Image: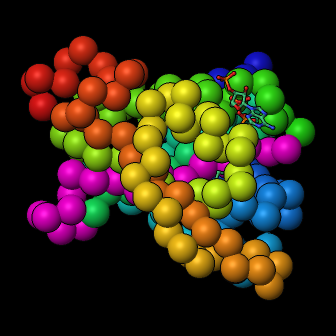
Amino acid sequence: MLQVRPAKPDDASTVMALKQAVLQQSRFLLLEVDEYQPTEAAEVRFIVDLAKADNGLYLLAMDDDIAVGHLVARGGCFRRNRHSANVFMAVHQDYWGRGIGRQLIDALLAWFADSRLTRLELTTAIDNNRAISLYQSAGFEIEGCKRGDIRIDGETVDSYLMSFLKNLPNPRTHDDEDTI
Ligand SMILES: CC(C)(COP(=O)(O)OP(=O)(O)OC[C@H]1O[C@@H](n2cnc3c(N)ncnc32)[C@H](O)[C@@H]1OP(=O)(O)O)[C@@H](O)C(=O)NCCC(=O)NCCS
């Protein structure tokens, strides 16, 4: 059964397998597959650190006990950027198009509404149509284009900087924003 829930330290090994798979499957992620050299201890630390942070979130989409999608939101470390979190996500290719990306984003936005954060941001290659369409339909907006941002297979590619803000009229902003 598919379920979206926060990551737990016990999930480290299935998270490692998921990351290795998605890095092989998609050219739109930042790391190339051989740049990911995981240790279980490092994955556990990453999960625990995000669980402890009041401005961080690590969500997994689980098919029974196998991680098939993940989403990370990491807030800044300083008083001047603690309110803003950087987001990235990926879903295993065998599970694309089944609404898992949408479930992960919806869970992110519900958490964001209850948090003290006021800004979510992410970057995505300008030709990553599936991701851009998901983010825009959830209420993220394109703020600008980062020219020559990344190199994919030797080719320089522009990225969009996208954001979702609490104090602006995003279409899917939750009702309790006044309490933040
Ligand atoms: C982007 C990604 C997370 C989407 O996950 P997913 O589980 O397939 O997403 P969903 O099934 O929830 O579909 C999301 C939306 O994309 C739309 N979509 C599906 N295929 C599409 C396509 N080829 N072009 C444009 N939009 C598309 C769907 O209609 C859906 O919109 P809706 O909810 O309004 O109907 C997934 O494809 C992925 O991991 N890609 C590789 C890694 C990546 O690019 N990560 C993002 C880096 S910024």
Q: Name the outermost residue toward the bottom.
A: 154
Q: Number of marks in the image?
A: 0
Against 78, residue 51 (above or below) is: above
Left or right of 176? Residue 173 is right
Which residue reaches farthest right? 94
Q: Is residue 40 visible?
A: no
Position in image of residue 145 (x %, y %): 49, 63
Residue, x 55% and y 38% (percent of image)?
135
**Residue 27 in the image: above or below residue 33:** above
Specify the color scheme: rainbow
Classify the position of ligand 1 by quadrant: top left, top right, bottom left or bottom right.
top right
Q: Residue 114 sits in which quadrant?
A: top left
Instruction: Find the magenta span and give its range.
Output: 77-93
Compare residues 130 and 64 and report the one nearer the observer. 130
Measuring 71% from the left and 45% from the top, which residue is drawn there? 129
Q: Is residue 77 above or below residue 174?
A: below
Quarter-of-image position of residue 43: bottom right
Q: Residue at x 81, y 35 (%)?
A: 96
Can residue 49 be seen here?
A: yes
Give percent across and percent down for residue 142.
46, 48
Give left or right: position of 95 versus 165: right
Q: Nearer the viewer, residue 19 or 8?
A: 19
Expressed as whole percent of the image width and height from the top left, the position of residue 100 reads: 69, 29
Q: Position of residue 35 (x, y in %)?
A: 72, 81
Residue 37 magenta: no
